[in-house]
Image (cartoon, helix red, strand yellow):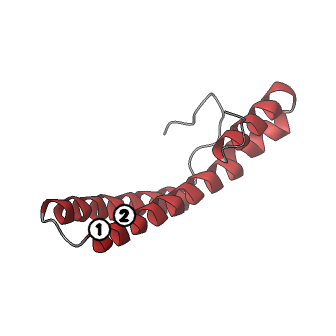
Amino acid sequence: MHTGRGYPRPVIEDIQKRALHRTKILEGQLRGLGRMIENEDYCMDIITQSRAIQRSLESLNRLLLENHLRTHVTHMFESGGDDREQAVTELLKAFDFDGR
């Protein structure tokens, strides 16, 4: 299993299972959205489906962020120094607070 950037903390098994399940749901939602567009369904129905996909992505992102906090960020803070600063930078970027 890839641990990312040399840190020894893998993906938490339960979070990985839940994240993979959500990606399968997202795949189905995206296929459905494509069919709706091809079929020229009512615009508001398409928008409703698109918003549901956005909420699903947000849910997936929360899971991935939880894993990152519980594994890599914890390790990086424990290491201190540049690793700690890297963790802060990554978290700011994850929340679009990185000033870009």
- The residue beneath circle 2 is 50
Of residue 97 and residue 6, the one placed in the foreground of this image is 97
Amino acid on which the number 2 mark rests in the picture:
Ser
Q: Could you classify mark 1 by the number of other residues whose Cα lies within 10 Å: few (under 14), some (14-19), or many (20 or more)?
A: some
Q: Residue at x 68, y 42 (%)?
A: 72
Quadrant in the picture for the C terminus? top right
On screen, residue 91 versus residue 43, left or right, reads: right
79 with respect to 98 (left or right): right
Q: Quick check: 9 above or below 70?
A: above
In the picture, the disc for residue 46 is 1
Q: Does 77 appear above or below 46?
A: above
Q: Residue 19: where, in percent of width, then height?
A: 47, 58
Give how far across and how far down residue 54 sits, in percent.
Answer: 45, 61
Rendering coords of residue 4 (x, y %) = 57, 33
The reply to whether discs 1 and 2 touch (Cβ–Cβ < 8 Å) is yes
Residue 75, image x, y percentages: 76, 40
